[in-house]
Image: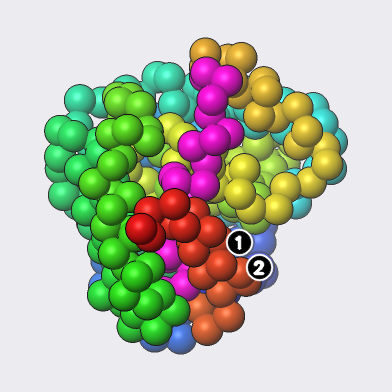
């Protein structure tokens, strides 16, 4: 876990969700997270918790419910994500300011080219991190550089849209009336498949079996999208390696994806 979090009771009013770090990585971390939650709600129409307080050392949000184990919930999530991605198309990649993915700063400097932005700000930026340097040898790092050089061949040119940026299943909860709600974002204007890849590559329950096909139907996604997931998900695997002593197999996943680029 990147942060300490839990429910807190109040003398008046309903319980709230409180999040803090043992050592806050930066003064503006929680303000950036609050901004991301508001952007997902106000720009993309997604349900998010209300921000009660966003200070230097603590973030207080309205409490949400556990995600129900039902197929219709995931079908509604497909509609939520499709609406977020199709109604927020932008002309540049990035975000007005840097924010955070876990404890690490996310570089959001604007760029008109998605392949350049993804290579610079989402993949190569992890190479100097100490744990990444320890996990990947020189051949691995050079293979990642080669993959970045060939990104225009590997990933189609698509316009950016507002993305959650850290959309694994644990960041999907429910509102009191059972609608999908998103938490813990690392927002930016990026390819929509960044969100799809994170859900595809991280454990998701059996009731999500229709989610991916429904999202593809709603957005007109081509049939080749599953083949792109390992390349796009490199960003999240590298982030996991950089921030955690135990990487849950992320380094092995990175090496497997980089294997064709080692020669």
Residue occupied by mark 1: 16
Q: How is the image coloured?
A: rainbow
Residue 86 rendering spot, x and y as whole percentages: 43, 19
| Quadrant of the snapshot with the N terminus | bottom right
Compare residues 140 and 195 and report the one nearer the observer. Answer: 140
Asked if one can make out residue 31 in the rendered structure from this viewpoint, the answer is no
SS assignment at label 1: strand
Does residue 56 lie above or below 97 as drawn?
below
Residue occupied by mark 2: 7
Compare residues 53 and 80 and report the one nearer the observer. Answer: 80
Q: Residue at x 30, y 26 (%)?
A: 157
Residue 209 rendering spot, x and y as whole percentages: 78, 33
Mark 2 and mark 1: Cα distance apart in space: 6 Å
* Sequence-first tag of 2 and 1: 2
Does residue 104 lie above or below 148 as drawn?
below
The part of the image, by quadrant, that contains residue 78 is top right
Residue 182 rendering spot, x and y as whole percentages: 56, 44
**Circle 2/circle 1 CB separation < 8 Å:** yes
| Quadrant of the snapshot with the C terminus | bottom left
Q: Is residue 233 magenta?
A: yes
Residue 55 rendering spot, x and y as whole percentages: 35, 68
- The segment highlighted magenta reads 221-242
């Amino acid at each position: 876990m990147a942060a300490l979090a839990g429910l807190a009771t109040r003398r008046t009013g309903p319980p709230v969700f409180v999040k803090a770090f043992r050592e806050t990585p930066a003064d503006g971390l929680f303000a950036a997270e609050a901004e991301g939650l508001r952007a997902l709600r106000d720009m993309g129409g997604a349900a998010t918790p209300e921000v009660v307080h966003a200070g230097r050392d603590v973030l207080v949000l309205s409490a949400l419910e556990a995600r129900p184990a039902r197929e219709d919930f995931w079908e509604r999530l497909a509609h939520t994500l499709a609406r977020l991605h199709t109604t927020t198309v932008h002309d540049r990649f990035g975000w007005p300011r840097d924010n955070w993915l876990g404890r690490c700063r996310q570089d959001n400097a604007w760029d008109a080219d998605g392949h350049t932005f993804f290579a610079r700000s989402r993949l190569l930026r992890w190479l100097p991190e100490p744990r990444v340097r320890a996990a990947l040898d020189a051949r691995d790092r050079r293979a990642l550089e080669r993959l970045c050089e060939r990104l225009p061949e590997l990933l189609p040119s698509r316009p950016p849209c507002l993305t959650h940026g850290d959309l694994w299943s644990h960041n999907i909860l429910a509102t009191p009336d059972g609608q999908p709600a998103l938490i813990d974002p690392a927002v930016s204007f990026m390819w929509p498949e960044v969100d799809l890849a994170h859900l595809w590559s991280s454990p998701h329950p059996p009731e999500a079996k229709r989610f991916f096909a429904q999202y593809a139907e709603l957005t007109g996604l081509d049939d080749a999208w599953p083949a792109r997931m390992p390349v796009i998900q490199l960003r999240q695997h590298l982030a996991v390696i950089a921030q955690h002593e135990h990487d849950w197999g992320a380094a092995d996943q990175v090496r497997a994806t980089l294997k064709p680029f080692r020669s």
